[in-house]
């Protein structure tokens, strides 16, 4: 079981770094990663001292700076209240405070042809329009995902028992032994071909409960370009951190 501690800070080359430390009983080495929110996460054995952890961070400072900066750039360039992916197509987002009876508070108008999403909201900060947009996207996912899942299930001949739309932090989807397919509501942001690959991936876990060579062989059968599609998910992993 992991043991969480408070935030830790240190200075590396005149740059202040904050990280979250997780201690694990059976872990042997120090691991470092940057979360989908751009946070530095360090996991270490219970017996490893802070001095040793900080020294490891200093040794790997180039990797740390590069990845933290990359997520910061993504956050600035991919602000969902300015630009938003819908079905993989970039849309301009506008927050409009001039509400009326026709366009009341909380209403969203999606212009598919002009690729715009207008949020009608008299707001003082970003939280309210973000919540409105998130609710709208989740409702779209509840309609879109089941349709796509049923269609793909029928096409490749792999049944499932039920679907849930969830707000997973680190997964696009999951597949249970009882036949439940769970999909992250952010699937509505992805290009259609990536959505299809993601659904095929989870459905095939009803047949293969692992990532064996046989699993990937079947994935390739139904999604020949799966490597490119999977790479797209990894390169756009920042999407998992939106609306948190």
Image (cartoon, rainbow, N blue to C red):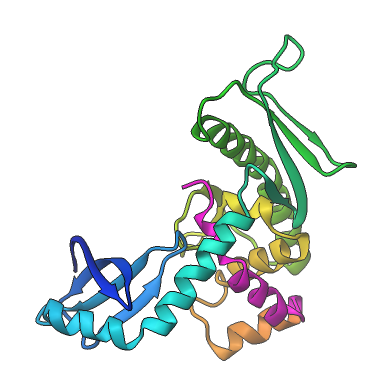
**In the image, residue 56 above or below residue 186:** below
Compared across the picture, whether 85 is left or right of 106 comes to right
Task: Please give the name of the residue rendered at 72% of the width and 48% of the height, measured from the top-left corner.
Answer: 147
Task: Please give the name of the residue rendered at 26% of the width and 72% of the height, measured from the top-left corner.
Answer: 11
Q: Is residue 236 magenta?
A: yes
**In the image, residue 121 above or below residue 49:** above
Compared across the picture, whether 208 is left or right of 200 comes to left
Q: Between residues 48 and 75, which one lies in front from this camera angle? A: 75
Residue bounds of the magenta highlight: 222-244
Task: Please give the name of the residue rendered at 70% of the width and 18% of the height, measured from the top-left corner.
Answer: 98
Q: Position of residue 65 (x, y in %)?
A: 43, 75
Q: Between residues 132 and 154, which one lies in front from this camera angle? A: 132
Task: Please give the name of the residue rendered at 90% of the width and 42% of the height, measured from the top-left corner.
Answer: 113
Q: Position of residue 182 (x, y in %)?
A: 53, 55
Q: Between residues 200 and 34, which one lies in front from this camera angle? A: 34
Picture quadrant of residue 77: bottom right
Q: Main secondary structure of the magenta part?
A: helix
């Amino acid at each position: 079981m992991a043991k969480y501690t408070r935030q830790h800070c240190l200075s590396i080359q005149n740059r202040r770094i904050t990280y979250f430390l997780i201690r694990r009983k059976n872990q042997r080495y120090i691991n470092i990663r940057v979360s989908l929110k751009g946070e530095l996460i360090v996991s270490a054995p219970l017996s490893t001292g802070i001095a040793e952890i900080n020294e490891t961070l200093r040794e790997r400072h180039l990797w740390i700076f590069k990845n933290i900066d990359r997520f910061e750039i993504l956050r600035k360039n991919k602000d969902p209240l300015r630009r938003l992916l819908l079905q993989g197509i970039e849309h301009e987002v506008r927050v409009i405070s001039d509400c009326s009876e026709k366009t009341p508070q909380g209403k969203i108008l999606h212009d598919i042809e002009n690729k715009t999403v207008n949020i009608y909201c008299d707001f003082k900060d970003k939280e309210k329009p973000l919540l409105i947009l998130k609710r709208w996207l989740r409702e779209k996912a509840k309609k879109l995902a089941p349709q796509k899942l049923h269609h793909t299930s029928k096409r490749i001949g792999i049944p499932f028992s039920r679907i849930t739309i969830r707000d997973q932090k680190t997964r696009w989807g999951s597949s249970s032994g009882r036949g439940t397919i769970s999909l992250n509501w952010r699937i509505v942001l992805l290009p259609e071909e990536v959505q299809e690959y993601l659904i095929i991936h989870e459905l095939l876990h009803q047949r293969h409960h692992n990532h064996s060579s046989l699993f990937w062989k079947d994935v390739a059968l139904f999604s020949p370009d799966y490597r490119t599609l999977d790479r797209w998910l990894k390169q756009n992993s920042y999407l998992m951190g939106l609306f948190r």
